Amino acid sequence: MEQSVHSFIRKNRLLHDGATVIIAVSGGPDSLALLHFFWKEQVFRSLRLICAHVDHQLRGEHSKADYLFVEDFCRTRSIEFEGATLDVKSYMEERHLSLQIAARECRYRFFKELVEKYHADYLVLAHHGDDQIETMLMRQVRGNFGASLAGIPVKRPFGQAHIIRPFLSVSKKDILAYCEKEKLTPCHDESNDKDDYTRNRFRHHLLPFIKEENPKSHVSFQKQSEWLLDDEVFLTELAKKALEEGIIKKEKHEVILSIPFFLKIPFPLQRRAIHLILNYLYGKNAHRLATVHIEQILELIKTEHPSSSCDLPNGIRAVRTYAQLVISLNEEEGLEFMEETTLFIPSEVKTALGYLKTSYEWSESIKLHPKEIICPVEALKLPLSIRTRREGDRMAVKGLNGTKELRRIFIDKKIPRKQRECWPVVIDRTGRIIWLPGLSVAPLETVTKMSQKCVRMTFETRDETLT
């Protein structure tokens, strides 16, 4: 494994001698192997190593034990250690984020503080080749576009430093073999064993099949990632140059485009030009763009109707008026996307359209209603999550065989287009949609007892006209 990593570092010019390096270490096999690798490397390259560990306070005594384990590992090897205990759950609830995104933001904020404190050159992360496969497939399935399809970058700027990922050249199997050879005893995060998160489902069910077909598939995916990124950088530069001539007006919240000029641009550049405009207007929310949003605007440009419009999430509106396309952002009207967020019980979650409340109660009656659910715990595959809809979403509907597209449900209920994109969707741990609050509920198996522990969920809209 060491030879592959050394070769990958040289090929991508990831590291220079005498650097100050911060290594993010959870205590699991990937990051512990990474720390051990750099600990052996530091003598030959005159590196200064700082180990950074975060306790997210999500796994009780287990995460405390991981903290102490990593701290002790560093002490016995004279590695500088920096640890932080962060209240991720409060951060998540305050900002209405998913658990994964809240944990990431807290973690990276800590890493940035360390980079500034030590004037570090690099922040080193332990993502490996199998992580790359999962990421690229997940983004493909979600309908991502552009550079994001290339997956995890090998190197990228991070404040005054760079994030580097030297283990993208090796597989999980390689890392476990390294741990065994070096007699490392990493921690185990039991949450990685469950199918609660999308990545885990890809890891447990899809990755083994890919590896069976090609044990070295991580090498192929990494090459594809690098080629995709190279191509995307080149095509995006061409799109930028084309836009310079085609844009009639550009302001903070509005871009006006010449349609006749735009239609002369090659189609691959048209997609990227629209992507650039949406990135510009969306700003920090640009990562939530999907191919469907780009396609909506392209269809608007090419329609035979001289005057038409379409609404995108978060207040983006595109209006065609004969030879011009006006794409604008109205922040006051913008209704926000919601990333997939764990639905804790009890809790109250604020959405763009109202409040969803959950609680436990003992009940003899079962209620499955669009605005309220009272359902036995054993009939639900917990934990539940809440998010906004995705392209192609379908759900089972009471009284119907099979499933129905959410798009059709919204149309049948006469929900305005801009509200459809931010309507809350409740899913179980398998990703199955069980409730479209205020509109539809899936048929759930119920067990009738005299008294049983139930989950109660209610949805209160801010404006009764919404439902």
Image: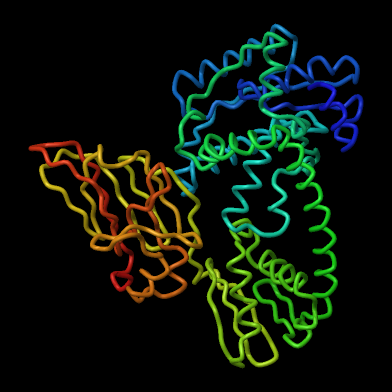
Q: Quadrant of residue 443?
A: bottom left
Screen quadrant of the C terminus: bottom left
Q: How many marks?
A: 0
In this image, 106 relative to 123: left or right?
left
Q: Which of the pair 434/454 is nearer the observer?
A: 434
The answer to which image quadrant residue 127 occupies is: top right
The furthest residue to the left? 450
Picture residue at 81% right of the left edge, 50% below the top: 227
Q: Quadrant of the N terminus?
A: top right
Left or right, residue 31 beside residue 106: right
Q: Is residue 90 visible?
A: yes
Residue 267 horizontal/vertical position (percent): 75, 74
150 w.r.t. 318: above or below = above
**Percent of width and height locating residue 428:** 37, 45
For residue 98, side relative to residue 170 (left or right): left
Residue 246, image x, y percentages: 79, 81
Across and down, in percent, residue 298 comes to 65, 77
Rendered image quadrant of residue 81: top right
